[in-house]
């Protein structure tokens, strides 16, 4: 097997909690063309796998993802003869992060174990929940080599961060810790590194116990409503509520509320388990 053909991601399914590990530690898990191809194929398959209840993404070694491989993704594909391949890879890169991952029909968790730079931000921002090691290092270093946070990275940080903070890190190229990432809203929370995966899998198990249809519809309603005004969002959420009931069948709502009426759980103090 050649280096370019070796698996660059590892996939493990543990009772419906699927862990996808970016596995290119010798390059800080930087994304090269072959990794983009493998990610696209894998997420396309997972999207229609009924056994998948939650997806966790993390990196091997000391890094989460150092962004694009500057040599293989930019420099090697910059010749005119490589234009077609370059455009194809860029399309694949954008599609798996900003469509397949962002709208995967199950909850997704980014477990940021170490270095996360540039294009790695799109992976984190496309996940529904992001938990970082306090010791992780984040950065938008493009400005340091006369570039800009390209692709969807600028869009990602304008959605996740307050304008002053997003523009500050984009302009200065300064790095910051996982703890700081939680303070500014880039990640959901930060925990000590030795606690990271335990915290991630506790959340994954919590999600795996909930109704998968309700999870999917909640996720879609939230993400699409972000692009709507109040009137549009109200109409859309109402329609999605009816859609949820349709997919669950009449028993879905009745069983859920029925469990509450029977005292099997109290809002804020438990949930109906699958």
Image (cartoon, rainbow, N blue to C red):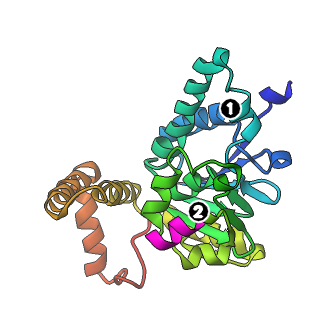
Tag on residue 171? 2
Q: Establish if 118 lies above or below 202.
A: above
Of the numbered discs in the image, which one, if any, rests on residue 222?
none
Task: Give the x, y percent position of residue 20.
Answer: 66, 49
Q: Nearer the viewer, residue 86 or 190?
A: 86
Q: Is residue 218 left or right of residue 62?
A: left
- Density class for disc 2 (Cα within 10 Å; few <14, some 14-19, many ≥20) is some
Residue 268, horizontal then vertical, whole percent: 38, 84
Q: Residue at x 50, y 37 (%)?
A: 95
CA separation in Å, label 2 and label 1: 27 Å
Mark 2 vs 1, N-terminal side: 1
Q: Quadrant of the N terminus?
A: top right
Dot 2 falls on a residue whose secondary structure is: helix
Please tell me in which quadrant of the rendered image residue 79 appears.
Answer: top right
Lateral position of residue 195 relative to residue 43, left or right: right
Q: For the C terminus, which image quadrant?
A: bottom left
Identify the residue at image location x=71%, y=57%.
Answer: 64
Relative height, residue 68 to residue 160 (above, below): above
Instruction: Using the rendered image of the protein, determine whether residue 107 is visible from the camera's viewpoint.
Output: no
Q: What residue span does the magenta drawing correspond to?
A: 163-169
Snapshot quadrant of residue 86: top right
Per the picture, the main secondary structure of the magenta-coloured stretch is helix
Q: Which mark is residue 33?
A: 1
Disc 1 residue crowd, few under 14, some 14–19, many 20+, Cα 10 Å: many
């Amino acid at each position: 097997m050649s280096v370019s053909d070796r698996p660059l991601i590892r996939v493990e399914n543990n009772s419906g909690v699927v862990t996808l590990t970016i596995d290119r530690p010798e390059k800080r898990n930087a994304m090269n063309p072959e990794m983009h191809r493998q990610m696209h194929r894998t997420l396309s398959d997972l999207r229609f796998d009924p056994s998948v209840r939650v997806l966790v993404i993390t990196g091997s070694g000391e890094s989460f993802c150092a962004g694009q491989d500057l040599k293989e993704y930019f420099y090697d594909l910059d010749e005119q003869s490589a234009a077609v391949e370059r455009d194809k890879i860029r399309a694949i890169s954008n599609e798996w992060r900003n469509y397949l991952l962002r709208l995967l029909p199950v909850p997704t968790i980014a477990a940021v174990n170490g270095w996360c730079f540039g294009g790695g931000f799109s992976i984190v921002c496309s996940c529904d929940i992001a938990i970082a090691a306090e010791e992780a290092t984040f950065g938008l270093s493009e400005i340091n080599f006369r570039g800009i946070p390209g692709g969807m990275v600028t869009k990602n940080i304008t959605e996740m961060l307050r304008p002053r903070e997003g523009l500050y890190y984009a302009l200065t190229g300064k790095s910051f810790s996982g703890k700081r990432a939680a303070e500014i809203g880039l990640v959901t929370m930060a925990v000590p590194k030795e606690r990271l995966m335990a915290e991630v899998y506790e959340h994954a198990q919590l999600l795996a116990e909930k109704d998968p249809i309700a999870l999917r519809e909640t996720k879609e309603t939230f993400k699409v409503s972000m692009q709507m005004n109040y009137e549009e969002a109200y109409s859309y959420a109402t329609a999605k509520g009816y859609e949820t009931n349709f997919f669950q069948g009449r028993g879905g709502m009745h069983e859920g509320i029925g469990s509450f009426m029977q005292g099997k759980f109290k809002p804020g103090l438990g949930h109906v388990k699958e």
